[in-house]
Image (tube, helix red, strand yellow):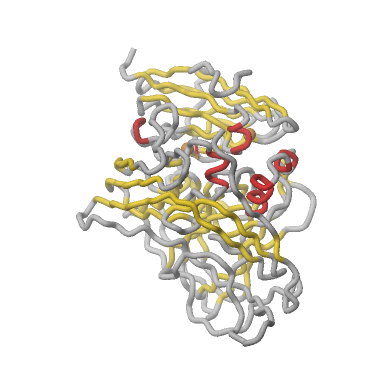
Amino acid sequence: MSPRWLLAAFWLCGCSADPAPGDSGPAAGGDGLEGSDGAEGGDGAEGGDGTDGDDPPALQQPLLQQPVEAEDLDPAEGVVQVSLVAAPDTHRLTDWRTGETIEIAGYAYNGSLPGPTLRARLGDRLVVDFENQLDDATTLHWHGLDVPNAMDGSPMTQAPVGPGERFRYEFTLEQAGTFWYHPHIDTEHQVDLGLYGAIVVEDPADPAVDADLLLVFDDWREVAETDAEPSAVHGAHGEVGLWAVNGQVLPRLVVGGGLRYRLRLLDVSNHGYLNLSLPGARVIGHDQGLDAAPAPADAVVLGPGDRAELELLPAEGLLALMDSPYSLNGGAALGEAEARLDIEVDVAAPAAAAPAWAFSGASPAPDPGRTDVLYVFQGEAHSDSWAINGEQYPDITVQSLSFNQDAVIEVRNLSATEHPFHLHGLVFELLSLNGVAPAFQERLDTLNIPIYGVARLRVVAHNPGMWMAHCHILPHADGGMMSMLQVTESTR
Ligand code: C2O
Ligand code: CU
Ligand code: CU
């Protein structure tokens, strides 16, 4: 693997003026109606009130910031052209509750973490002029988008973009929803060090909301563990981390009663799961935009790579997006839930009527009973040795589908941990999980497979090329849990 990572991860503790943990009431300090847009990205939870002398500043709860948005450099309608530069950058995260600061000599896109949000509309042409200012080769992958094979950023289909090199990615956006971009070379390290950003593809047919917000979740403690002590991470999967939302620990979102919010949640961590609940909110979408039907937001499990969209119609009071313990070794776990985002309604008003989302109400496709591609997940956590069908990437057997074949993929998890299965290039539909069909159609690109679980997935092989199929727990993918699915050019 590439050169040794120079990494400083350390804790600065013990500011005397800390608020006690748990004393997390909204700090005083004026603010208006925050949180919709216009906030600059950038990290840190700066508080303090400019008192002089050597006293450490008192920390206060930061207001949620939105990631910066990439500037569209092409004025033409229907084209979004952006420039992304990957370069070394130092990231700093302060937990305002304890004063603890994590500093990481990492990487960033355009100097921001999360990287700039790419926002476009369904049907737009997206042009990304990418420049690599790292000392390492990298690529860009468009997680969840069925892009042409040559644009996919997989090391099997694209020559790496070397240090100092440029590459233009270009494709048409044919799916609406919340997606993300990240490298696909040395992925575990590069994503961990800060290379990720969101992609929002708006559907002009969607009803209007008052604010459309991103919540990008990353676990920062796994960063420190992974890179400072490579051996320590292997025992740490699924353990308690320090979660940040858009690069801030437990920020506060101020919302207005009577307004309509669309929250796009994305888990970009290497191996951390979230088990979220937000009272009164509804889940309206997952990986591929709107779901077929809404559901209450009471146990929204997000594994690495996963997305969910929530509708929030606040009225009055205080709310919190809570995260209940979740273990890779068996799902919901014992322990107390922790807040990840505090939400404060600044002006009480009756809740708005729900926007008229175009839920299709579609039923899942019937299971034809046969299996065209089988993936058996096995492995062993202590050695981080993982395999699909007994093979470890890159020494794998490529399985094939013919162009436009309507096929069934079965994924069986025969290991003692859960795995988020992810497929490139071909969105799949869930036919059943452990023999049970979902109540409504579910179209996904990332699906958590429980321990000893069996998922049956339908794909229509509309996109020719070589596509990666892997676990999105990045240490697992790195440890061999990755395969390739080929879609041949012509019909048999
Ligand atoms: Cu999010 Cu193979 O990738
Ligand atoms: Cu992907
Ligand atoms: Cu896995």
Q: Residue at x 32, y 44 (%)?
A: 173
Q: Residue furthest bottom?
A: 52
Answer above or below: position of 113 versus 412: below
Q: Quadrant of residue 479?
A: top right
- Where in the image, quadrant-wise, is ligand 3 located? top right
Q: Residue furthest right?
A: 334
Answer above or below: position of 91 versus 480: below
Q: Quadrant of residue 5?
A: top right
Q: Nearer the viewer, residue 352 or 151?
A: 151
Q: In the picture provided, is 57 more to the left or to the right than 348?
A: right
Q: Residue furthest top?
A: 492
Answer above or below: position of 92 versus 145: below
Quarter in which the N terminus is drawn = top right
Q: Nearer the viewer, residue 163 or 344?
A: 163
Q: Residue at x 41, y 48 (%)?
A: 133
Q: Position of residue 259 (x, y in %)?
A: 46, 71
Quarter in which the C terminus is drawn = top left
Q: Nearer the viewer, residue 169 or 29?
A: 169
Q: Position of residue 327 (x, y in %)?
A: 72, 44
Q: Residue at x 41, y 58 (%)?
A: 356
Q: Quadrant of residue 305?
A: top right
What is the number of callouts on the image? Answer: 0
Q: Position of residue 78 (x, y in %)?
A: 24, 51
Q: Residue at x 53, y 65 (%)?
A: 43
Q: Nearer the viewer, residue 438 or 458?
A: 458
Q: Position of residue 153 (x, y in %)?
A: 41, 36
